Image (cartoon, rainbow, N blue to C red):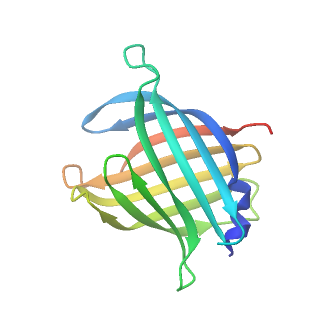
Amino acid sequence: MEIKDLNFLAGKWHGFGLAVYPDIIPVSYSEMLTCEYDMHKDLLSYSQFTKYTDPERNGRTLHMESGFIRKSESGVIELSNAQNNGRVEVMILDECDLFAEEIPLIFRSKLFGNDPRMIITERLYNYTGSKISYEMKMATMKNPELSTHLTGELIREKQ
């Protein structure tokens, strides 16, 4: 697989999600995702912003991250990002079926930096035409069982 095969992710996406975890109060959020393919560097860059949607904090920033999807020298497709909480993360594309009606993309953590709490993460995306649904799972030192942390759905903005 080549990075250009993932060009269907390019565009501006918006939607809503829910953050849950064993030790947090569930919180809903809005999300904006921008993804661009650079043919000269053969990579996808992205930036993601979420904002609270509850009445008390509506519109305040919840989370931000930006990163790249690229092919490593060993031929593995990696998603790397930096997050506003200081964590950096590299994940490997573990599963993808470009010929499925609903294209699954599953990234699993390879390494973390600047956050000793983390054990493992998984990001599961399902792409269908103008929609991406996702689930992010993680395990931490405090909660070692892999558990859902984020779920959401994004719609591609019309150009």
Residue for point 42% across, 13% down? 55
8 relative position to 65: left or right? right
Q: Does residue 94 lie above or below 82 as drawn?
A: below
Q: Is residue 96 visible?
A: yes
Along the line of sight, the residue nearer the viewer: 87 or 141: 87
Residue 76: which quarter of the image? bottom right
Name the residue: 54% across, 38% down: 152
Where residue 25 sits: x, y (%)?
30, 28
Residue found at x 37% / y 46%: 84
At a point 68% along the width and 51% down the height, the residue shown is 127
- 133 left or right of 88 in image: right
Judge by depth and name the residue closer to the eye, 96 or 111. Answer: 111
Most extreme residue toward the bottom is: 74
Q: Residue furthest top?
A: 55
Between 70 and 141, the one nearer to me in the picture: 70
How far from the left and from the top, in percent, is residue 135? 50, 47
Q: Residue furthest right?
A: 159
**Where, quadrant-wise, is the C terminus in this rendering?**
top right
Residue 147 horizontal/vertical position (percent) = 35, 48
Is 104 above or below relative to 78? above
Count of marks placed on residues:
0
Looking at the rendered image, the quarter that the N terminus falls into is: bottom right
Task: Using the image, determine if residue 60 lies above or below residue 42.
Answer: above
Residue 128: image location, x then y, percent: 73, 48
Q: Residue furthest front?
A: 40
